[in-house]
């Protein structure tokens, strides 16, 4: 019962363990809870096939991943209270994004020097998310004297990961619209967990079977920096730097030791996927972005 008690209090975030789901499983709850626990144990257990596969061609991508952020006690504005249902917009249709960017056709009145376009992780509430919000703040602090707008990619962030393609389309269309309305604006794009997959697809790197629109090639030069955290592309033993000669040189990829979601060789530590917000990665990303924007 000790193991049960430990599992009962934890939560699922960005596709990893961070939600109070275990008690229903061990007490004979519905089948979905049981399969969710089994998927997590398979993903992070020492015998995880995904972590041990030697080559991308032999890997079978998961068809459904654990959900995220149904509750986070003690942190205001994130998730829902324990025992309550997650907002419908998390699993069905995307809600209005967080945006301070200029809409298409708005002219230059709302244009900024820099537009940050960030995709949240699986199950995170609509907007910039738990990682995108502090990242935007850190980038603004690292760019004194410059105006910075931010946009949270408007997509469902579903557990199945099938929403990554539509998310990429929204990211690409937003970049295209703001670029047309604001000729002097530079872009910083990125995402966390499934949001990193959104970013991959938007810059022309497919993942699994989901597809979406890409950022027009003519706008690539206006994307000054790309930052991703816990990118599932790592499951295929690949990086953006390896897959894209255009975006690779201006990309910073964060994959914590033990984070199986991004293919860490030491995969199996569930908490590793949740530490990007607190281990200095956000500050490192902001400094990287500031360096790429220097002189531009």
Image: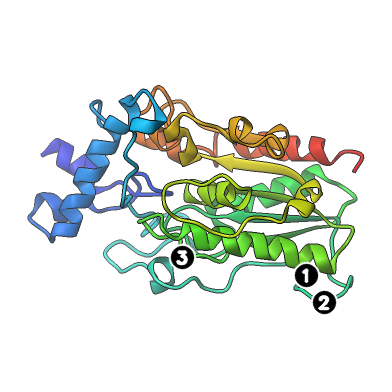
Residue with the mark numbered 3: 156
Q: Residue at x 86, y 56 (%)?
A: 113
In this view, the residue in front, 209 or 269, is 209
- The reply, left or right, for residue 254 in relation to residue 184 is left
Q: Are marks 2 and 1 in contact (CB under 8 Å)?
A: yes
Which residue shows up at 59% across the image and 60% down it? 213
| Residue 280 visible from this viewpoint | no
* Sequence-first tag of 2 and 3: 2
**Callout 3 touching callout 1 (CB < 8 Å):** no
Give the camera-side residue of 284 and 48: 48
On screen, residue 102 above or below 253? below
Q: Under tag 3, what secondary structure?
A: loop
Residue denoted by label 2: 106
The residue that mark 1 highlights is: 102
> Where is 100 relative to 217, above or below?
below
Residue 93 in percent (x, y) is at 45, 73
- Report, in whole angstroms, how far the alpha carbon at label 3 lies from the one at label 1: 22 Å
Q: Where does residue 186 sit, x and y in percent of width and height? A: 82, 52
């Amino acid at each position: 019962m000790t193991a049960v008690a430990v599992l009962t209090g934890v939560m699922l975030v960005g596709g990893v363990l961070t939600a109070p789901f275990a008690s229903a499983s061990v007490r004979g709850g519905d089948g979905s809870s049981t399969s969710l626990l089994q998927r997590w144990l398979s993903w992070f257990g020492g015998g995880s096939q995904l972590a041990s596969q030697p080559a991308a061609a032999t890997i079978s991508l998961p068809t459904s991943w654990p959900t995220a952020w149904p509750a986070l006690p003690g942190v205001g504005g994130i998730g829902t209270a324990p025992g309550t249902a997650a907002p419908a917009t998390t699993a069905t249709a995307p809600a209005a994004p967080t945006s301070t960017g200029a809409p298409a056709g708005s002219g230059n009145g709302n244009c900024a020097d820099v537009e940050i376009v960030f995709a949240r992780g699986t199950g995170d509430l609509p907007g910039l998310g738990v990682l995108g919000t502090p990242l935007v703040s850190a980038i603004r602090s690292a760019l004194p004297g410059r105006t910075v707008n931010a946009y949270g990619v408007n997509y469902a962030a579903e557990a199945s990961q099938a929403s990554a393609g539509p998310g990429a389309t929204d990211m690409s269309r937003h970049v295209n619209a703001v670029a047309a309305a604001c000729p002097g604006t530079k872009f910083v794009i990125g995402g966390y967990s499934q949001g990193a997959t959104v970013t991959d697809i938007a810059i022309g790197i497919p993942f699994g079977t989901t597809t979406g629109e890409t950022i027009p090639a003519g706008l690539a030069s206006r994307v000054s920096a790309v930052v991703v955290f816990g990118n599932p592309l790592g499951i295929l033993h690949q990086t953006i730097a390896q897959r894209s000669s255009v975006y690779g040189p201006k990309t910073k990829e964060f994959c914590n030791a033990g984070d199986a979601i991004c293919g860490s060789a030491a995969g199996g530590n569930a908490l590793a996927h949740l530490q990007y917000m607190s281990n200095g990665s956000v500050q490192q990303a902001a400094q990287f972005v500031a360096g790429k924007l220097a002189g531009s």
